[in-house]
Image (cartoon, grey):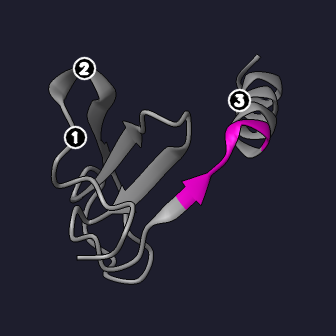
Amino acid sequence: MTEGATASASRENRKAIPVSCALHQGPRGFANLVVERKRDGEIVLDPHVTGACVIILDEAAATTLFDVLGTWLG
């Protein structure tokens, strides 16, 4: 499993979100995106909950994403 993957995350620091996958073209909610907050503050995004390809955001990147989503969602 890739370093930073979410297999050992506690429930308090881990959330599965039903999403759509453009590559696999399943229905809405077909895929799961696991979001985990690591002890060091990094945020890990694990599409398909496989640990095969994770996206790791440091605090600055996570804050930028938070700000962008807040702007877009009002």
Q: Nearer the viewer, residue 31 or 10?
A: 10
Residue 9 % position (x, y): 22, 40
Q: Is label 3 or label 2 in front? A: 2
Q: Is label 1 or label 3 in front? A: 1
Q: Which residue is mark 3?
A: 66
Residue 67 % position (x, y): 80, 27
Q: Which residue is mark 2?
A: 12
Residue depicted at x 40% and y 77%: 53
Q: Nearer the viewer, residue 34 or 12?
A: 12
Q: Give the left or right position of residue 36, taking residue 26 as reference.
A: right
The residue segment tinted magenta is: 56-60
* Amino acid tagged 3: Phe
* Amino acid tagged 2: Glu
Q: Nearer the viewer, residue 21 or 62?
A: 62
Q: Give the left or right position of residue 21, taking residue 29 as reference.
A: right
Residue 3 % position (x, y): 37, 69
Mark 1 Cα shell of 10 Å, populated few (<14), some (14-19), many (≥20): some
Say what secondary structure mark 2 lies in: helix
* Amino acid tagged 1: Ala
The tag earlier along the polypeptide, 1 or 3, is: 1
Q: Would you say the residues marked 3 and 2 are in contact, meaning their CB atoms lie under 8 Å apart?
A: no
Say what secondary structure mark 1 lies in: loop
Residue depicted at x 17% and y 26%: 11
Q: Which residue is mark 1?
A: 9
Q: Is residue 22 magenta?
A: no
